[in-house]
Image (cartoon, helix red, strand yellow):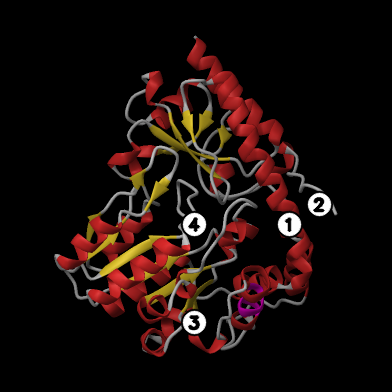
Amino acid sequence: MSITPLQALPIDVLRRRTSTKWRTYPADVIPMFVAETDFPLAPRITEVLAEAVAIGDTGYTPPDPGIRAAFAGFAGRRFGWQVDPARIRTTADVMMGVVEILRAVTTPGDRVVTTPPVYPPFAMCTAEAGCLVEPVPLTDTGSGWELDLAGIEAALAGGARAVLLCNPHNPTGTVHSAASLAALAEIAARHGAVVISDEIHAPLVHGDGVYTPFLAASPAAAEVGYAVTSASKAYNLAGLKCALMVTAADGPAAVLRGLSDEVEWRTGLFGANAGVAAFDPASDAWLDSLRVTLDGNRRLLADLLAAHLPEAVYRVPDAGYLAWIDLSAYGWGDDAASYLRRAAKVALHHGPLFGPQGVGFARLNFGCAPELLTEAIERIGAVARA
């Protein structure tokens, strides 16, 4: 049975939005930088939020808003991953969860491994937790990216106490293999370290990718690991503030229980209720339609770049709606995004913010209408030909 692609909202409607994507730059700039998408909400989410507004249900988040059980059901249904709701706690967003877990499992001054090019808040949140970043870049295989397991082992053997994993990886869209995740877990266990895995893009793994939750990669992964996730990226709910910190063994679960109650109080009521609606089976058809649209866009982008920017290097991502594009051949400087915002009126995310490996790169958000994606690349192509 074919699945109908999800249609983006019209541009005039999108420009009525008040979020970062649509209010950061003037109206003549196409915004493709921050990870927000341009689609209507899943109908079940709209229904739940509209009802809450209608009855003034805008108070404090209760001890059990249902999000833990909803996520466990979603994980089992979509990933074949059996999650115990009793081993989950919530907070406002994924990076807040990362910071609080780091504070619980490290000592100020400890080193934390990251795998650049990687989501810029990883470095900021490591510093917020009082730790130091130890970058171990991904290995470029020539056709994709992999964890540098030998480099990570060396860092942990040298005293680093934790690894911040991004699975699926932002910005490359890499879905790490089950074998590499299991090997990472063994390395961490060998050195008494922990792995904190940001898995926020997991619902958007494309058909040719195989997502393995880190905590399910092996018994060792369950013992050393924490997953932090949210409905916010797949369902465009970032402003509503709800994330889940997930564990799969007694030791990590005890660490979560030891976090201050204030960490959980930061969960937004609208975020929890919208997350329950997102993880409901009633929203599965919407998610499937979104994935069809994004699958088409990631392939369309390859065609557009070949036609308009043939010297750009782009690998079709395994997951998500973020494209990592090497534009260094065009001589637009270390930060091509800054140049293109001025010259092409297209706002991309700044490659160097993802680490030195991002020099000459830009990240592009293709979670939009194909027509808008086409216009953006045509604008950049015109600059390249000028």
Q: CA distance from mark 1 to mark 3?
A: 27 Å
Q: Secondary structure at mark 3?
A: strand
- The residue pinned by badge 3 equals 89
Residue 89 in view (yes/no):
yes
Residue at x 41% of width, y 46% of height:
145
**Magenta region's main secondary structure?**
helix
The image quarter containing residue 143 is: top left
- The residue pinned by badge 1 equals 288
Q: Amino acid at mark 3?
A: Arg
Q: Earlier in the sequence, mark 4 or mark 3?
A: 3
Q: Secondary structure at mark 2?
A: loop
Residue 16 in view (yes/no):
no
Q: Earlier in the sequence, mark 1 or mark 3?
A: 3
Q: CA distance from mark 1 to mark 2?
A: 7 Å
Residues at discs 4 and 1 in contact (Cβ within 8 Å): no
Q: CA distance from mark 2 to mark 3?
A: 34 Å
The quarter of the image holding the N terminus is bottom right
Q: Earlier in the sequence, mark 1 or mark 2?
A: 2
Q: Which mark is residue 168?
A: 4
Assess disc 1: are there few (<14), some (14-19) or many (≥20) residues with their C-alpha within 10 Å of its C-alpha. Answer: some
Residue extent of the magenta highlight: 70-74
Q: Amino acid at mark 1?
A: Asp
- The residue pinned by badge 2 equals 3
Q: Residue furthest top?
A: 386
Q: CA distance from mark 4 to mark 3?
A: 21 Å
Residues at discs 1 and 2 in contact (Cβ within 8 Å): yes
Q: Amino acid at mark 4?
A: Pro
